[in-house]
Image (cartoon, rainbow, N blue to C red):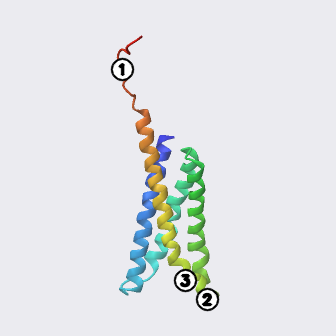
Amino acid sequence: MKASRIAYEIAGWLFIIGVLVQVFFAGMAVVAGRWGWDNHINLGHFLAVPLLVMLVTAYVGKLPGRMKRLTWLLFGVYVLQADVLIFLRASAPVLSAFHPVMALIDFALGLTLARQARAIIRADKTAAVPQPQPEGIPGD
């Protein structure tokens, strides 16, 4: 259970780093005009890996129900962003424009989940440390 929770946290932080790198790649394509979109597209598809790890380890690590629901929400936002909205450029450009906005949601949810995982792991460590018992209690 502990290893699953640690894996969840690591996957969460990797996802967040990936989102930040995604923004950089988009900036290199749009603002700097230095790169094409291949790096952005490839990393975007790869970001499903840490999300899938998070989904599995949320259950194996017996994380709280709220975290499981937020993990599913993050996965849903990711799928909507990466596999639905981006393909609506020609038919619904206004909807497609929400693609970068959803990156903010990805980041916020990912950060929230990674922090919650870290807090749970720390709480587990604190609970695992035996508390010193007083030697003799007066009146015994």
In this image, 60 relative to 9: left or right? right
Residue 52 versus residue 32 in the image, above or below: above
The residue drawn where x is 54% and y is 78% is 99
Q: Is residue 67 left or right of residue 3?
A: right
Compare marks 2 and 3 and give the one earlier in the sequence. 2
The C terminus is located in which quarter? Answer: top left
Q: Residue 124 appears in which quarter of the rendering?
A: top left
Nearer to us: label 2 or label 3:
3
What kind of residue is marked 2? Ala
| Residue 36 seen in this snapshot | yes
Circle 2 or circle 1, nearest the eye:
1
Which one is in front in this view, the residue at disc 3 or the one at disc 1? 1
**Disc on res. 98:** none
* Upstream in sequence: badge 3 or badge 1: 3
Residue 92: percent from left, percent from top? 63, 86
SS class of the residue under badge 2? loop
Residue drawn where x is 58% and y is 47% of the image: 59
Which residue corresponds to the image point at 55% horizontal and 79% vertical from the top-left?
98
Residue 97 is labelled as 3
Circles 2 and 1: CB atoms closer than 8 Å: no
Q: Can residue 89 be seen from the camera position used here?
A: no
Q: How many C-alpha atoms fall within 10 Å of the one at disc 3: few (<14), some, or many (≥20)?
A: some
Q: Work out which residue is located at the far right of the displayed protein and give it.
A: 91
Question: In the image, residue 95 lies at what x, y percent?
Answer: 60, 82
Q: Answer whether labels 3 and 1 touch (C-beta < 8 Å).
A: no
Q: Which residue is mark 2?
A: 90
| Point 36% across, 25% down: residue | 132
Q: Quadrant of residue 62?
A: top right
**What is the C-alpha distance between the residues marked 2 and 3?**
11 Å
Helix or strand or loop: what does disc 1 sit on?
A: loop
Amino acid type of the residue tagged 3 in the rendering:
Ala
Q: Which residue is mark 1?
A: 134
